[in-house]
Amino acid sequence: MTNTELVLNALAEISTTEISKATNPQGITEATDVTIQGGNIARNARESLEKQIGRSYYPH
């Protein structure tokens, strides 16, 4: 895993944890929604990085 991948993964995990603390999800559905929100934060960061560097970070 590259440093960027590690940082984006950590961002997703930390974001999910903080959202969970703030919203106190009840049940699997709410917990899943929180997990998706945390992942979206990391995805937005990755997409912003890709826009700045002018290429996709992950090879497809």
Image: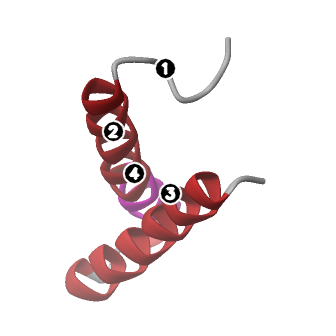
Question: How far separated are the C-alphas under marks 3 and 4?
Answer: 6 Å
Q: Find residue 26 and name its label.
A: none
Residue farthest left in this picture: 22
Q: Nearer the viewer, mark 3 or mark 1?
A: 1
Task: Looking at the picture, tell me which residue is in the foreground, 39 or 27.
Answer: 39
Q: Is residue 36 visible?
A: yes
Identify the element where label 3 is drawn. helix
**Residue 26 placement, left or right of 22:** right
- Quickly name the residue at label 1: 56
Question: How far separated are the C-alphas under marks 1 and 2?
Answer: 9 Å
Question: How far separated are the C-alphas under marks 2 and 3?
Answer: 11 Å
Q: Find residue 8 and name its label.
A: 3
Identify the residue shown where x is 29% and y is 40%: 44
Q: Which amino acid does label 2 sit on?
A: Leu
Identify the residue shown where x is 39% and y is 51%: 42
- Quickly name the residue at label 2: 49
Q: Find residue 42 and name its label.
A: 4
Identify the element where label 4 is drawn. helix
Q: Do the residues labelled 3 and 4 touch (CB within 8 Å)?
A: yes
**Residue 21 vertical position relative to residue 36 in the rendered view, above or below:** below
- Badge 2 or badge 4: first in the primary sequence: 4
Residue farthest front in this picture: 53
